[in-house]
C-alpha cells in the first residue's frame, strides 16, 4: 500500500479558495510526486473527493496513461464526526484498512488523502509509531494478512 498526501493547496498558504485547489507550488509538487511514483506498479487508487487530492492524483495518472488503473473517489473513512476523538478516528482507520486489505489481496493500492492527521493515523495503525506526515510525502507499507512491514515513511526526497 502506498500512501500519499496531497500537494500544497491554496488553503495551505492562506488563500481563501472555496475549491481548495493546488497552488502553483502544489502543481509542481504534484508532478514531482507523480514522477517519483511512476516506477511503482499500482492497480487501484483510492482518492479523497477533495479537489486538491484529485489534482494530485491526476498528475500521477498522467504519468501512466497506458495502464488501466481503477480509481475510486471516496471519503474512504466515511464522514468526519464533530469533535471526533483520536480513538474513534483510529477505529475508523482500522476498519477501512481491514476492508482494503481484504478487497485487494495481492494488489498494489495508492491512497491519496487530504488530511495529514489521517495519514499519520494510518501510519500509527500499521506501525504503532507516531510520525508527523509532511505534505506531498510518500509512505509505503507491505501488508500481508496480519503481517505489516514499513518500507518507507514520510519520504519527500522527490521534492528536492
Image (cartoon, rainbow, N blue to C red):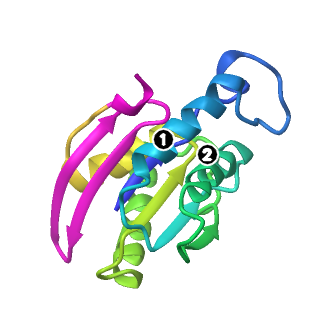
70 horizontally vs 118: left or right: right
Closer-to-camera residue (63/122): 63
Query: Which of disc 1 and disc 2 is earlier in sequence?
Result: 1
> Residue 95 location, x and y as percent?
41, 69
Hey, which quadrant is residue 49 in on the image? bottom right
Residue name at image x 44 percent, y 68 percent: 96
Under circle 2, the secondary element is: helix
One can see residue 105 in this view: yes
31 horizontally vs 86: left or right: right
> Residue 156 location, x and y as percent?
37, 31
Cα separation, mark 2 vs mark 1, equals: 8 Å
Hey, which quadrant is residue 130 in on the image? top left
Residue name at image x 37 percent, y 46 percent: 121
> Residue 22 location, x and y as percent?
70, 33
Are discs 2 and 1 less than 8 Å apart at CB? yes
The correct choice, above or below, for 51 with respect to 27 in the image is below
Q: Which residues are magenta?
A: 132-160
- Which quadrant, please, contains the C terminus? top left
Hey, which quadrant is residue 126 in on the image? bottom left
- Which quadrant, please, contains the N terminus? bottom left
Closer-to-camera residue (132/108): 108
* 141 part of magenta stretch: yes
Residue name at image x 55 percent, y 55 percent: 63
One can see residue 133 in this view: no
> Residue 9 location, x and y as percent?
67, 30
| Residue on which the image places disc 2 | 56
| Residue on which the image places disc 1 | 33
Amino acid at each position: 500500500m502506498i500512501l500519499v498526501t496531497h500537494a500544497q493547496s491554496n488553503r495551505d498558504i492562506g488563500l481563501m479558495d472555496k475549491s481548495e485547489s493546488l497552488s502553483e507550488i502544489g502543481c509542481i509538487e504534484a508532478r514531482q510526486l507523480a514522477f517519483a511514483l511512476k516506477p511503482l506498479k499500482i492497480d487501484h487508487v483510492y482518492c479523497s473527493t477533495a479537489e486538491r487530492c484529485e489534482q494530485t492524483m491526476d498528475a500521477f495518472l498522467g504519468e501512466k496513461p497506458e495502464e488501466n488503473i481503477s480509481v475510486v473517489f471516496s471519503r474512504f473513512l466515511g464522514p468526519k464526526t464533530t469533535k471526533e476523538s483520536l480513538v474513534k478516528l483510529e477505529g475508523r482507520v482500522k476498519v477501512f484498512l481491514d476492508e482494503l486489505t481484504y478487497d485487494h489481496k495481492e494488489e498494489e493500492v495508492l491512497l491519496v488523502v487530504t488530511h495529514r492527521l489521517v495519514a499519520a493515523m494510518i501510519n500509527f495503525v500499521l506501525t504503532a509509531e507516531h510520525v508527523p506526515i509532511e505534505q506531498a510525502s510518500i509512505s509505503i507499507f507491505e501488508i500481508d494478512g496480519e503481517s505489516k512491514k514499513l518500507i518507507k515513511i514520510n519520504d519527500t526526497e522527490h521534492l528536492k
